[in-house]
Amino acid sequence: MPHFSRTESTFTPPVPEAKRWIEGIDFPADRPLINVSQAAPVDPPPPALRRAMAEAMEVPETHLYGPVLGLPKLRAALAKSWGAHYDAEVPAESVAITAGCNQAFAATLAAICGEGDEVLLPTPWYFNHKMWLDMQGVRTVPLPTDDRLLPEAETARTLITERTRAIVLVTPNNPGGVEYPAETLSALYELAREKGLWLIVDETYKDFDSRTGAPHDLLKREGHEDTLIQLYSFSKAYRLTGHRVGAIIAKPALLTEVEKFQDTVAICAPQLGQVAALWGLENLSQWVSGERDEILARGRAIAEQFPRLAAKGWVLKGLGAYFAYVEHPFAAPSSELGPKLVRDAGILALPGTMFMPEGDTTGERHFRFAFANLDTQGITTLFDRLCELDWPLAGKDSAA
């Protein structure tokens, strides 16, 4: 009888898989690789933060295990910051610090789901969410989105069963870039509350939302503790990707269950990263505001230049935070075009198939471009290369 492990129940991680496409390829100095495959800043933290981290390295406690749910000062600081952003009361005991937001998701799902339970995940989805659900033995129920890449509560309602435990949202969205309107979040929150489900809102890209003020009022609603769970990452705002610092904002009783997961898997989030996140919260609000302005400017540059691609048959489906989700005009599927894009254009991008259920052919028509590391000139160069592609077009050259 064949035996399958938990890891064998899911697919190969997309980013490492895509990176293998560039192995053995030399990119000339005058035409370097444009990497839009991963949503991670490549620049180091700002100098002042690096100095604070260097000083922390000389403190003996930095090198020891810390509290399982995070440094008390960091929990308190994030609670204060989070509460101010949402104009709501957030106690420090409602905050847990994790080793990155991926672990925040894993810990949360481990705390609320059992074998054979179900979770609704809007498509296109963030692939690591699907991978963890697979490995935990939880059935992922695809929640189709509309032509604006937004999930609708009435569609979700038709997919809920007695085994459903949660609806998961990411806003600003990865991979679509879309900023979910307050009314979308409200409708899904009310549905979750009505059905006794958790609404998990991953706000990793909160700091790069183009809207001013709170993007929703869910934290201000009476009894939200029994429905709402929020996730966050310090990695993007402070360029701490390698230091793995994320967070869960949820009721303390749930964090008691999260603590079991944390203590078993990581014991605690890395101490140096937590010190850096705390220093960032206390000192870098103006710097983060500048980072947000730059990312928003890059998004505007994509919107302004996209008509060049639209004239070639491309369609911009979603844009925001670090991402543009685009429909390509070519006859071949994106799963084949991904490696070809590397060879022919020197562009590394993830095909839409990496964000869709197996067998859903809509992924073959799309790519995700993560543009956090492209300035305006880099975006221009990206579009120049895409405009030069002379591949057979769907429904045109392909019919010959």
Image (cartoon, rainbow, N blue to C red):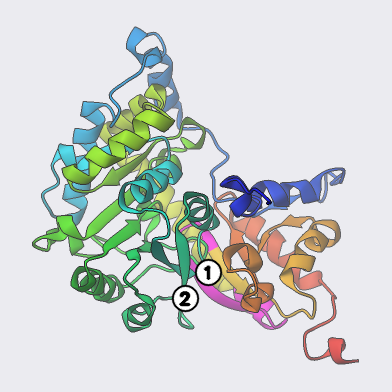
Secondary structure at numbered mark 1: loop
Q: Is residue 257 above or below residue 117?
A: above
Mark 1, residue position: 124
Task: Tell me, yes or no, whether the two marked residues, 1 and 2, touch with CB atoms within 8 Å.
Answer: yes
Residue 104 falls left or right of residue 251 = right
Asked if residue 370 can be seen in this view, the reply is: yes
Q: Is residue 181 above or below residue 139?
A: below
Q: Percent from the top left, x then y, of residue 198?
A: 27, 61
Q: Amino acid at mark 1?
A: Pro
Q: Percent from the top left, x then y, of residue 287?
A: 37, 40
Q: Is residue 352 above or below residue 94?
A: below
Q: Residue at x 37, y 23 (%)?
A: 271
Q: Amino acid at mark 2?
A: Leu
Residue 289 falls left or right of residue 363 = left
- Distance between mark 1 and mark 2 Cα atoms: 8 Å
* Quadrant housing residue 80: top left
Label 2 CA crowd tier, 10 Å (few <14, some 14–19, many 20+): many
| Magenta segment includes 315 | yes
| Magenta segment includes 120 | no
Residues rendered magenta in the picture: 306-323
Label 1 CA crowd tier, 10 Å (few <14, some 14–19, many 20+): many
